[in-house]
Image (spheres, rainbow, N blue to C red):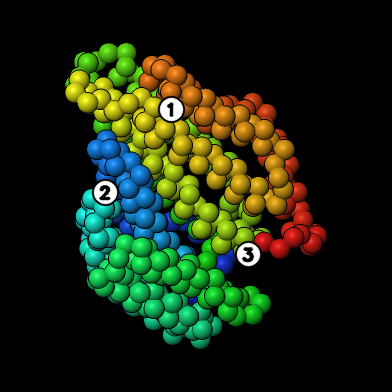
Amino acid sequence: MTNAVERYRHGLSPMRGRAQHEKHRAATPLEALYDLVFAAAFGVAGVELAKGVDAGHGGAAIGAFAFAVAAIIWAWINFSWFASAFDTDDWLFRVFTMVQMAGVIVLAIGLPTMFASLEGHGAFDNRVMVSGYIVMRVGLLAQWLRASRDPAYRRHALTYVLFVAVAQIGWIVVAWAPLPLGAAFAAAAVCWLIELGGPIVAERKGEGGQRGTPWHPHHIAERYSLLTIIALGETVIGTLAAAQEVSHEKGWSGDAVVVIGAGVAMTFALWWSYTMMPSGPILAVHRNRSFVWGYGHAFIFASVAAVGAGLHTIGYAYRHENPLATPVVILMIAVPVIVFMVSISLLHSYLVHSLMKGLPLHAIAMVLPLLGILLAFAGLPLWTCLLVVLAGPVFVVVAYEAGGWRLAQRHLDEALGRAVDGTPERAA
């Protein structure tokens, strides 16, 4: 009877901080459901980037994409860290989560308008995006106010409320005030500083075991890995879109087979490389490394989504009329692959506090995409350049599985050993 009540009843319960090292803590079905709206948002941003580059607005489209994915990722971060620390899974928590999901959908609806405003060199128009954030933050602020009723974390929660509210007021001003483009970007930069600074200030509240909110290290590491997979979904969608375009123009030829094979292999190689990062074990003993790790993931999520947009542009290169130039397509794929590999290498080294001796492997992995770019400008076929770019992340996977994992394991063991022994390390 008790198990049945626990399984099916979702009555209101006091919102209290969860145990930092709760056993068997895993991502919930609600969190997986929540992530679906981010799959849609990444998809809209990727399509708009591919369309903008194809239309000849590469610089503006890339800038708009960076702004879009930053807004998408930040919305996810706001929810995920809160849920890791305070999730009650009662009916009110679920309802407020649904409200935040609706806000993300409104945000995604506003992305094409924002892209068009930058590509048209007119006034920066992010009003619909900000409207989505207003909806999201109704739910988020309500959750933080619920959490503030826990005396142990009241200061933390109210600090979050203050920073979130001030930042949101700033975004409303940026969206609706008649500011010139330069002034709008300056005001947006101030808003971002407030956004990013809020968690830094709030997580320094408290003393001892109650310093910071009680997020769960392995749970948050799993949540980040799941959003990486969500972003990788864009590489699958990009591959599908490109293969459809190629098969439409040339039929089921060898080119279509290469596109599908390279796209799927790229998806696996990026995912495989990501799984080598020892996030959970390190965060469990070094919670102070969470900020660089958490914020640094923005480059991983953005680069993965950008690879998907780049794969999408392959189809544009096979059109009979106005085909997209091969160098542009390869740049769209190779540059985000390089950003991904650099981000993974730096975050891995930061987590274990050791400049990995395996970095030459990563250097080779970065040189190969650069070589692919040079080959594209030299006039080699697109499929040849694509395979050279793909060889970069594939090389890292093969090298690690062939024996490089031993070095990575030794670095991890040393990092965990220093934590157990209390050996001093440089500040995070």
Q: Amino acid at mark 1?
A: Ala
Q: Amino acid at mark 2?
A: Glu
How much space separates mark 2 and mark 3, taking CA atoms? 40 Å
Give the structural element (helix, strand or loop) at label 1.
helix
Judge depth for marks 2 and 3 and give the one in front.
2
Pointer 2 or 3: first along the chain:
2
Residue tagged by mark 3? Answer: 288
Residue tagged by mark 2? Answer: 119
Pointer 3 or 1: first along the chain:
1
Q: Amino acid at mark 3?
A: Asn
Give the structural element (helix, strand or loop) at label 3.
helix
Position of residue 218 measured from the top left corner of the image (x, y, whole percent): 55, 56
Q: Is residue 295 left or right of residue 101?
A: right
Judge depth for marks 2 and 1 and give the one in front.
2
How much space separates mark 3 and mark 1, taking CA atoms? 35 Å
Position of residue 341 measured from the top left corner of the image (x, y, whole percent): 54, 39
